[in-house]
Image: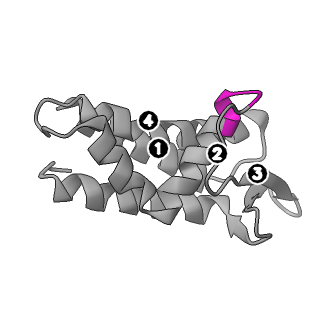
Amino acid sequence: MSPAQEQFARLERYLVRLGGRGATADDRDDLLAFFMHAWHMADWASNDPTLHRTLHEIRSAAKADPHIAICSDLADGIKHLVLTKPPRAYGQLTSRIVAVAGLEHPTASYSVTLPDGSVRDALTLAESTVKAWRKILTGYGLNL
């Protein structure tokens, strides 16, 4: 398995974890980790000797996709207490809705709010991000 394939597989495993939509702190950490791993896919792909692409090429393709662009800013916001560069489409996790009625294990859904006030479901954003990365990476010839 190449480095980019390894990172993409990790990204898919995090997406599966998110499908459980748990309400624990660990589940929220998995969500945050997903966004960091999603953005770092560019680094793994650019350092994969089978792809022959620069970090600039891969990041340009990634930032052209609105879902990955949001992931980029979420990852930066998660990793850094203070951002030193202006965000592009900076979204923030702004709400968590927990459903507990009749459930042994509470579930949660998370929302991402963008600067224009629009709100995206975090799981839907994660799913769209994986699809976007799959399209970019297979377009570069990576077998996924």
State the mark number for residue 38: 1
Amino acid tagged 1: Ala
Residue at the spot x=71%, y=48% of the render?
A: 22
Dots 1, 4 in contact, CB < 8 A? yes
| Residue 109 horizontal/vertical position (percent) | 74, 59
Q: Earlier in the sequence, mark 3 or mark 2?
A: 2
Residue 136, quarter of picture: bottom left
Is any atom of residue 30 visible in this view? no
Distance from label 2 to label 4 (Cα)?
12 Å
Dots 2, 4 in contact, CB < 8 A? no
Dots 3, 4 in contact, CB < 8 A? no
Dots 3, 2 in contact, CB < 8 A? yes
Segment tinted magenta in the rendering: 77-82
Amino acid tagged 3: Leu
Q: Earlier in the sequence, mark 2 or mark 1?
A: 1
Q: Which residue is mark 3?
A: 93
Dots 2, 1 in contact, CB < 8 A? no
Q: Earlier in the sequence, mark 2 or mark 4?
A: 4
Distance from label 3 to label 4 (Cα)?
19 Å
Can you say whether 58 is above or below 78 in the image? below
Horizontal relation, residue 47 to residue 91: left or right = left
| Residue 67 horizontal/vertical position (percent) | 51, 61
Q: Which residue is mark 4?
A: 40
Circle 4 sits in a helix, a strand or a loop, which is it? helix
Residue at the spot x=14%, y=40% of the render?
A: 51
Q: Residues within 10 Å of mark 1 (few under 14, many from 20)?
A: many
Q: Which residue is mark 2?
A: 74
Is any atom of residue 108 visible in this view? yes
